[in-house]
Image (cartoon, helix red, strand yellow):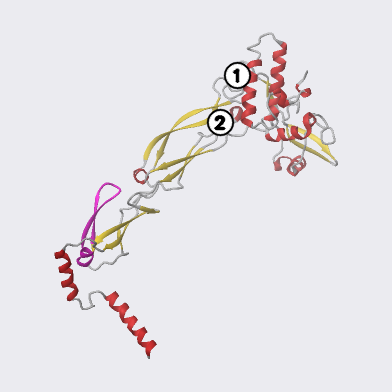
Amino acid sequence: MSATEIDYYELLEVERSADDKTIKSSYRRLAMRYHPDKNPGCGDSEARFKQISEAYDCLKDPQKRAAYDRYGHAAFQQGMGGGGGHPGGAEFGDIGDIFESIFGSAFGGGGRQQARRGADLRYDMEVSLDEAFHGKQTEITIEVSQSCEPCNGSGAEPGTGKRGCNMCGGHGKVRAQQGFFVVERTCPTCHGRGEVIEKPCRSCGGEGRVDKPQALQVEIPPGVDSGTRIRLSGKGEAGPFGAPPGDLYIFLHVKRHKVFERDGTTLITRVPITFTTAALGGSIDIPGMDGENLSIDIPAGIQSGKQLRKRGAGMPVLQGRGRGDLVIEISVETPTRLSARQKELIRELQATETGDECPQSKGFFDRIKEAWSDLTE
């Protein structure tokens, strides 16, 4: 009995609602069971192996599976869609297929297709602000599809090869007539390659690639920020059947720091000072990101919210020269635990105040008096 007479889902022993992972797992299990190498001289096993391979070739492809779910085996029989042409006509619903047939390569047509490169992958990495400042080299391990070593990515069992596709005659395209149009699309059996594998590789099941962990060295340069993207060329998913691999993109996320906030290359910190330092002036020491102490001069009479700037004490410029600035925002702290002597000294100070010592307060209350006088006149 040929595979075209048996339901593909029954051949692979899965439900019609099975996901791609379940179908792939069942195919590999059955392929190992019926592989000719495990059953030498058994014609039934060899026939069964070809049947499940044909079924999996259909169900692993989303478009091909959708056509099969809708039309069954008729979707891949000659003349499907209303006409002749190359054997293996299938359902055509994309207007781009008609343009491709009429205008040729200008719309992507023109013979068998080359295998597409592997997919690009994304990896999210979190780094501290200190690591973003100094940069670092680290190692990551990711699970990724890599080229199968036994078959060298070809998908064919070592010592075997490929043959021309019977469905498209090795053209990589199938045609069918719809009304006045002869439409052409990629062959659903060989996926445009024009050839099929006679004996799939036992290690990869004919995929040409296998999933396995890969350790990679990543160089993080100084000055990176959240959203910075590092590209590792050729470290993405392996391409099918020996095609080039995709790229791996590492997206960085910088963790919040306990002391510093960041705005580009500018670092910002809020520093509380005593009211005596605010009144008389002085200096404070702040540890910088490079480990050096920074001496900050506090001018006499400074107010809360005033910002002081230290040039060249911020973050490094990514892939450039120099550093940004450090901004120190002052917060004047009012004392809450005073001794009796300290309170006495402050009362003496209060007794000598004339109002000119605090021009902002004096100006505010003068405006209040003026506004009140205007209301009472």
Q: Is residue 339 visible?
A: yes
Residues marked 2 and 1 touching at CB (< 8 Å): no
Q: Quadrant of the N terminus?
A: top right
Q: Give the mark nearest the N terminus, 2 or 1.
A: 1
Q: Nearer the viewer, residue 251 or 28?
A: 28
**Callout 1 secondary element:** loop
Residue range corresponding to the magenta coloring: 275-297
Q: Nearer the viewer, residue 216 or 338?
A: 338
Where 144 falls versus 124 (above or below)? Answer: above
Residue at image point 63% right, 27% down: 24
Horizontal side of 150 relative to 345 (left or right) equals right
Q: Nearer the viewer, residue 83 or 345?
A: 345
Residue 151 x, y percent position in the rendering: 58, 21
Residue highlighted by disc 1: 202
Residue highlighted by disc 2: 238
Q: Nearer the viewer, residue 199 or 181?
A: 199
- Count of all numbered marks drawn on residues in the image: 2
- Label 1 environment density (alpha carbons within 10 Å; few <14, some 14–19, many ≥20): some
Is residue 292 one of those drawn in magenta?
yes
Is residue 266 one of those drawn in magenta?
no
Residue 41: quadrant of the picture: top right
Horizontal side of 255 relative to 95 (left or right) equals left
